[in-house]
Image: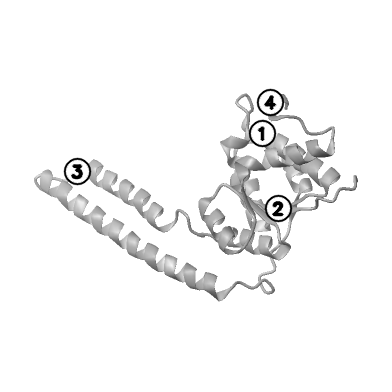
Amino acid sequence: MAEYPLKQRFVLDTSLFLSEEIRDDDETFEEGVERLLDTIAAARLDLNISCYMPPSIAAELEHILRERGVSEELLGKLDTWVIKKHPDRYEVYIPAEIVYRFIDEMSDRVNRGLRVSEKAVRKAEETRLQSDGASKMSDVDKVISDLREDYRGALRQGVLDSREDFDLLILARELNAGVVTEDTGIISWAADFGLRNLRGRAFPTLLEEYLMALGDPHPQSRSKW
């Protein structure tokens, strides 16, 4: 392994691998993911840059990749170059201020969710009156569909809404690692946790630039992969 002073750790989110932004125009989904994993491998061997995932996120990603029909060879590369590690939930401490802010935010989002629901009920009633009392399931279905979308936006977008997201942040805090994600909720909370964070779309370029600065023969510009 080449000696190099830059030794960093990154914790990767599923959204990194699913982002269209990491692929060239002529690449398939599998080709883009494979190129990313090859770059991660080169960075590990030549720069001692390590990439981690909590097992919960790794399992989620593997399930998605299998659904998209990727090869077993690609899954093997993922298992080889991305380290799975459980976050130490008992030893990593979170400032009370962060917990207070989370409680306040969730309380505010519940209120927003109630307002969205009230709006949907009024809209459904207006639809019923306009149809002279006749049942129009298509109109009701449309109201329900809009309700689901608006409710999800009010309660879930921009907030930690799963154990997997929390595992990612706790692991990054434990390792003093950077968080790589396209999820705006994780990005926001990574800042509150005092963690470095990087948009997934920028991560392949970052590694390639590091490798080229070292004079490594592996990396190439994205247009040449």
How packed mark 3 is, by other alpha carbons closer than 10 Å (few <14, some 14-19, many 20 or more), is few
Give the label, 4 or 1, closer to the camera. 4
How packed mark 1 is, by other alpha carbons closer than 10 Å (few <14, some 14-19, many 20 or more), is many
Name the residue that disc number 2 marks: 10
Ranked by sequence position, the earlier of labels 3 and 1 is 1
Query: Tag 2: residue type?
Result: Phe
Ranked by sequence position, the earlier of labels 2 and 3 is 2
Task: Work out which quarter of the rendered image holds the C terminus and state it.
Answer: top right
Name the residue that disc number 1 marks: 32
Ranked by sequence position, the earlier of labels 2 and 4 is 2
* Relative image position of residue 28 (x, y in whole percent): 63, 29
Residue 40 in sight: yes
Residue at 38%, 56% in the rendered image: 154
Q: Is residue 117 left or right of residue 165?
A: left
Query: Tag 1: residue type?
Result: Gly
Residue at 62%, 24% in the rendered image: 26
Instruction: Give SS at disc 4.
Output: helix
* Disc number placed over residue 223 in the picture, else none: 4
Instruction: Give SS at disc 3.
Output: loop
How far, Cα to Cα, is label 4 from label 1? 12 Å
Query: Tag 4: residue type?
Result: Ser
Q: Is residue 87 left or right of residue 114?
A: right
Name the residue that disc number 3 marks: 136
Give the label, 3 or 1, closer to the camera. 1
* Relative image position of residue 197 (x, y in whole percent): 62, 53
Tell me, yes or no, whether the two marked residues, 4 and 3, touch with CB atoms within 8 Å: no
How far, Cα to Cα, is label 2 from label 4? 25 Å
Q: Is residue 97 left or right of residue 113?
A: right
Give the label, 2 or 1, closer to the camera. 2
Q: Is residue 119 above or below residue 110?
A: above
